Amino acid sequence: MSITSQIARNGEWEKLSLFGPINEDAEVHLPKLVQALGQNVIINFKQVESVNSCGVRAWITFMRELEKGRTLVFEECTPDIVSQINMIPNFRGKAQVQSVYASYTCPSCGNQQQHLFVKGQNLPAAASDGGGQVNCAKCGKPTEMDELEEEFFAWVEA
Ligand SMILES: [Zn+2]
Protein backbone atom coordinates (compact mmCIF):
# COMPACT_ATOMS: atom_id res chain seq x y z
CA MET A 1 0.00 0.00 0.00
CA SER A 2 1.46 3.34 -0.97
CA ILE A 3 0.32 6.90 -0.85
CA THR A 4 -2.07 8.29 -3.45
CA SER A 5 -3.43 11.78 -3.89
CA GLN A 6 -6.15 13.82 -5.51
CA ILE A 7 -6.13 17.47 -6.53
CA ALA A 8 -9.39 19.42 -6.69
CA ARG A 9 -9.54 23.00 -7.88
CA ASN A 10 -11.83 25.52 -6.18
CA GLY A 11 -11.41 29.12 -7.36
CA GLU A 12 -7.94 30.31 -6.40
CA TRP A 13 -7.36 27.33 -4.15
CA GLU A 14 -6.42 23.79 -4.84
CA LYS A 15 -7.10 21.01 -2.40
CA LEU A 16 -4.55 18.23 -2.25
CA SER A 17 -6.06 15.21 -0.52
CA LEU A 18 -3.68 12.46 0.55
CA PHE A 19 -4.64 8.81 1.02
CA GLY A 20 -2.83 5.91 2.68
CA PRO A 21 0.49 5.84 4.51
CA ILE A 22 3.25 8.43 4.22
CA ASN A 23 6.22 6.05 3.97
CA GLU A 24 9.21 5.38 1.67
CA ASP A 25 6.91 5.40 -1.39
CA ALA A 26 6.25 9.09 -0.69
CA GLU A 27 9.78 9.83 -1.92
CA VAL A 28 8.61 8.93 -5.43
CA HIS A 29 5.07 10.25 -5.25
CA LEU A 30 5.39 13.63 -3.52
CA PRO A 31 7.98 15.36 -5.78
CA LYS A 32 5.65 14.87 -8.77
CA LEU A 33 3.01 16.98 -7.04
CA VAL A 34 5.12 20.14 -6.79
CA GLN A 35 4.73 20.96 -10.49
CA ALA A 36 1.07 20.02 -10.50
CA LEU A 37 0.06 22.49 -7.77
CA GLY A 38 -0.72 26.20 -8.02
CA GLN A 39 -0.06 29.05 -5.60
CA ASN A 40 -2.65 28.40 -2.91
CA VAL A 41 -2.85 24.87 -1.62
CA ILE A 42 -4.91 23.23 1.10
CA ILE A 43 -3.47 19.88 2.11
CA ASN A 44 -6.03 17.49 3.58
CA PHE A 45 -4.70 14.69 5.80
CA LYS A 46 -7.98 13.06 6.80
CA GLN A 47 -7.26 9.78 4.97
CA VAL A 48 -3.58 9.51 5.91
CA GLU A 49 -3.22 6.21 7.74
CA SER A 50 0.26 6.49 9.22
CA VAL A 51 3.59 8.26 8.94
CA ASN A 52 6.95 6.56 9.36
CA SER A 53 10.46 8.02 9.54
CA CYS A 54 11.19 7.57 5.80
CA GLY A 55 7.89 9.28 5.09
CA VAL A 56 8.76 12.18 7.38
CA ARG A 57 12.05 12.72 5.53
CA ALA A 58 10.28 12.65 2.17
CA TRP A 59 7.62 15.00 3.49
CA ILE A 60 10.10 17.60 4.75
CA THR A 61 11.92 17.59 1.39
CA PHE A 62 8.55 17.99 -0.34
CA MET A 63 7.51 20.89 1.91
CA ARG A 64 10.78 22.70 1.31
CA GLU A 65 10.05 22.74 -2.44
CA LEU A 66 6.31 23.24 -2.16
CA GLU A 67 6.39 26.25 0.17
CA LYS A 68 8.45 28.33 -2.26
CA GLY A 69 6.13 31.18 -3.31
CA ARG A 70 3.02 29.37 -2.15
CA THR A 71 0.43 29.78 0.59
CA LEU A 72 -0.13 26.44 2.28
CA VAL A 73 -2.84 25.33 4.69
CA PHE A 74 -3.08 21.99 6.50
CA GLU A 75 -6.57 20.76 7.26
CA GLU A 76 -8.08 17.76 9.06
CA CYS A 77 -4.69 16.68 10.41
CA THR A 78 -4.95 13.26 12.08
CA PRO A 79 -3.52 12.76 15.61
CA ASP A 80 -0.47 11.14 13.94
CA ILE A 81 0.14 14.23 11.81
CA VAL A 82 -0.34 16.51 14.82
CA SER A 83 2.38 14.68 16.74
CA GLN A 84 4.75 15.11 13.76
CA ILE A 85 3.89 18.84 13.68
CA ASN A 86 4.66 19.07 17.39
CA MET A 87 7.92 17.12 17.22
CA ILE A 88 9.36 18.42 13.94
CA PRO A 89 8.84 22.13 13.12
CA ASN A 90 9.89 21.54 9.49
CA PHE A 91 7.00 19.12 9.04
CA ARG A 92 4.63 22.03 8.57
CA GLY A 93 7.20 24.62 7.55
CA LYS A 94 5.30 27.83 6.76
CA ALA A 95 1.94 26.14 6.42
CA GLN A 96 -0.98 27.32 8.52
CA VAL A 97 -2.81 24.62 10.42
CA GLN A 98 -6.54 25.11 9.98
CA SER A 99 -8.02 22.01 11.62
CA VAL A 100 -6.95 18.90 13.55
CA TYR A 101 -8.52 15.70 14.82
CA ALA A 102 -7.97 14.58 18.40
CA SER A 103 -8.77 11.06 19.65
CA TYR A 104 -10.97 10.63 22.70
CA THR A 105 -11.88 7.58 24.76
CA CYS A 106 -14.96 7.33 26.97
CA PRO A 107 -14.07 5.97 30.44
CA SER A 108 -17.71 4.99 31.02
CA CYS A 109 -18.44 2.85 27.93
CA GLY A 110 -15.05 2.49 26.18
CA ASN A 111 -16.22 4.22 23.00
CA GLN A 112 -13.45 5.80 20.93
CA GLN A 113 -14.12 8.85 18.78
CA GLN A 114 -12.38 11.65 16.97
CA HIS A 115 -13.15 15.30 17.50
CA LEU A 116 -12.34 18.05 14.99
CA PHE A 117 -10.87 21.34 16.21
CA VAL A 118 -11.11 24.23 13.74
CA LYS A 119 -9.18 27.48 13.93
CA GLY A 120 -11.52 30.42 14.54
CA GLN A 121 -14.18 28.07 15.92
CA ASN A 122 -13.31 25.65 18.73
CA LEU A 123 -9.51 25.52 18.55
CA PRO A 124 -7.96 26.78 21.83
CA ALA A 125 -5.81 29.92 21.55
CA ALA A 126 -3.29 28.56 24.06
CA ALA A 127 -2.16 24.96 24.61
CA SER A 128 -2.89 25.25 28.33
CA ASP A 129 -6.56 26.02 27.59
CA GLY A 130 -7.00 22.44 26.40
CA GLY A 131 -9.83 21.23 24.20
CA GLY A 132 -12.67 21.65 26.69
CA GLN A 133 -15.22 18.98 27.45
CA VAL A 134 -16.02 16.52 24.67
CA ASN A 135 -18.97 14.24 25.39
CA CYS A 136 -19.25 10.63 24.28
CA ALA A 137 -21.29 10.18 21.10
CA LYS A 138 -22.68 6.89 22.47
CA CYS A 139 -23.48 7.48 26.14
CA GLY A 140 -23.21 11.27 26.46
CA LYS A 141 -20.74 11.19 29.36
CA PRO A 142 -17.50 13.22 29.31
CA THR A 143 -14.60 11.60 27.43
CA GLU A 144 -10.84 11.94 27.87
CA MET A 145 -8.32 12.87 25.19
CA ASP A 146 -5.87 10.04 24.44
CA GLU A 147 -2.91 12.45 24.60
CA LEU A 148 -2.05 15.12 27.12
CA GLU A 149 -4.07 18.11 25.94
CA GLU A 150 -1.29 20.57 26.59
CA GLU A 151 1.13 18.53 24.46
CA PHE A 152 -1.40 17.90 21.72
CA PHE A 153 -2.11 21.62 21.31
CA ALA A 154 1.53 22.74 21.73
CA TRP A 155 1.68 23.71 18.04
CA VAL A 156 -1.01 26.43 18.36
CA GLU A 157 1.55 28.68 20.05
CA ALA A 158 4.43 27.86 17.69
ZN1 LIG B 1 -19.43 6.58 26.46
Image (cartoon, grey):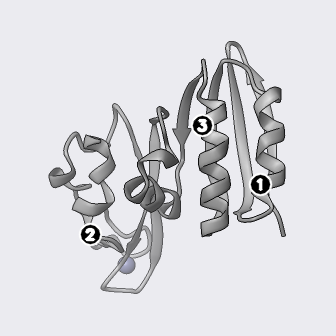
Quadrant for ligand 1 reads: bottom left
Sequence-wise, the earlier of marks 3 and 1 is: 1
Q: Amino acid at mark 2?
A: Leu
x%, y% of residue 115?
A: 43, 58
Q: Considering depth in this image, is 123 or 68 the residue closer to the camera?
A: 68
Q: Secondary structure at mark 1?
A: helix
Instruction: Return the residue at label 1.
Output: 27
Q: Quadrant of residue 133?
A: bottom left
Q: As shown in the figure, which amino acid type bears the numbered disc 3?
A: Arg
Q: Are marks 3 and 1 in contact (CB under 8 Å)?
A: no
**Among the two numbered marks 1 and 2 on one chain, the one whose residue lies closer to the N terminus:** 1
The kind of residue on which mark 1 rests is: Glu
Q: Could you say which is closer to the camera, residue 73 or residue 9? A: 73
Residue 55's label in the rendered image is none
Q: Residue at x 82, y 64 (%)?
A: 2
Residue positioned most to the left: 128
Judging by the rendered image, the residue that carries numbered circle 3 is: 64
Tell me the CA gap for discs 2 and 3: 30 Å
